[in-house]
Amino acid sequence: MTQTTGRDAATVRLGAAGAAVTVATLVTNALAYVVPVLGARRLSAADLGALATVLALGAIAAVPGFGLQIAVAAHRARWGGGGAGRLGLRTAALTAAVAVAAAPVLTLALRLPVGLTLLLAASTFATVLSGRWLGELQGDQRFLRLAVAMAVLAAGRYGGLIVGLVLGRGPVACLLLGTLTGLLALPLLARLATPSTATPPNSATPPTTTPSDTTTGQEPAAPGQGVPRRLDARQVMTACGATLAMLTISYADLILARQLLPAAGSGAYAVGSVLTKGALWAPQVVTLLVLPRLARGDRRARLVALALILTCGAILVAASALGGELAFRLAGGADYLHLAGSAPLFAATGALYAVVFMLVNDRVATAARWPAAPLWVATVGLAVAATLIAPRTVTGVLACALAAATVTAVTMAWLVFRPTRR
């Protein structure tokens, strides 16, 4: 009875954590959405284009931050200990230095004010460095604090921008305010990540596993057992490469549609891709919550997470099949209702990539070699098929994207679940 009660309490806590992280994600997306909406009303077309371009570059430059978070979370869950401070600072400084070096090129090639490109480096530093503290909270499974930290980071990244736009300032002043609020958020994140005396780091009970539970043949170890391995740059680079691969393959079809289709077809595909991204990102809270357990080689957690993501994907695909017209009306308006029959295919592509993302995170967390290699191969295959084989229509590009997502999901599942040789 006591064991059952304990499991029920743990389930309730995990559910509350999942709800909190979901709310934090919604807050982040809402604040990110407010910026272009306000910008369209407060800025001229030229200024809006410049600000939107810099924000897109900032999203790309933030990839090392996501990689840092994954690497820190996996290492902390598996081995415990520290070592993230200096490495986080070096990662953020290196990313900012690259942004500074690229500033003259970006200024000339994209016709941007030099102030915007230089501020991009400062804002990138803050965003990447925040990955250290988010990773510590995630690895320690302090998910309620993680949700608060995510909201704080979102307020820092977008709060200054929103204030600047409300005040009617130009893009340089808006990004300056956004950079300042982003930097001010860092001490708050550090405070949230500081362990309290009542909640020591890695307080969650590690699952009972055997060496065969991992995909790499390594025995999962609870933090504090033996000599903890140090977090090094290689682990961060591996996680960054995996994050970049995940973003690349999930946006490759949209970029190909822009290159291969006429303007009307490209716009229609962009509307359909809203369904793809919705099905992709809807279950990502599951991957975030399960990552520490994946790092410890918990097979049951992996199966439960996969089942949840598949269930979420199936529901979204079924909903898009039943309400395809409504989905396209909400995503793009009445002009795109002729694509309603393709709604389940767009949703299925995103649902399969959600599975791929979880399995790639599993490979990164368990220190597998070349965890993102299948994604790069699939991206090349998608580009070749869409360019040389498929008809240059929305359906043709979509069929290639769905095939690439299917093959990648099957390949990743085989790599993760294949028997381990002893």
Image: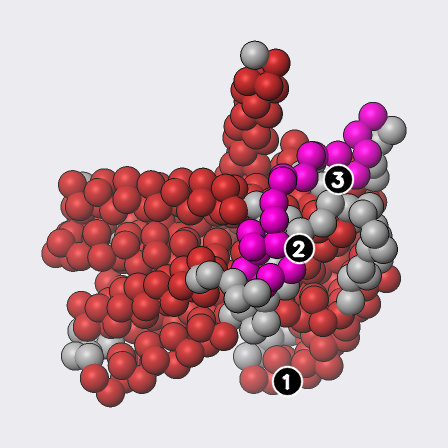
Q: Looking at the picture, which amino acid does disc 3 mark?
A: Asn
Q: CA distance from mark 2 to mark 3?
A: 18 Å
Which residue bears the numbered disc 3? 202
Asked whether the viewer can see residue 18, the reply is yes
Q: Earlier in the sequence, mark 1 or mark 3?
A: 1
Q: CA distance from mark 2 to mark 1?
A: 47 Å
Whether residue 199 sits left or right of residue 264 in the image: it is right
Whether residue 204 sits left or right of residue 198 in the image: it is left
- Mark number, residue 219: 2
Which residue bears the numbered disc 1? 105
Q: Looking at the picture, which amino acid does disc 1 mark?
A: Val
- Crowding at dot 3, Cα within 10 Å, few <14 / some 14-19 / many 20+, comes out as many
* Range drawn in magenta: 198-219
Q: Quarter-wise, where is residue 398 in the image? A: bottom left
> As displayed, is residue 386 above or below residue 342?
below
Q: Position of residue 358 (x, y in %)?
A: 48, 54
Residue furthest to the top: 1
Q: Quarter-wise, where is residue 191 in the image? A: top right
Whether residue 421 sits left or right of residue 224 in the image: it is left
Instruction: Residue at 78% x, 67% y: name it.
Output: 232
Asked whether the viewer can see residue 336, the reply is no
SS label for mark 1: helix
Q: Earlier in the sequence, mark 2 or mark 3?
A: 3
SS label for mark 3: loop
> Which of the pair 402/46 is nearer the observer?
402
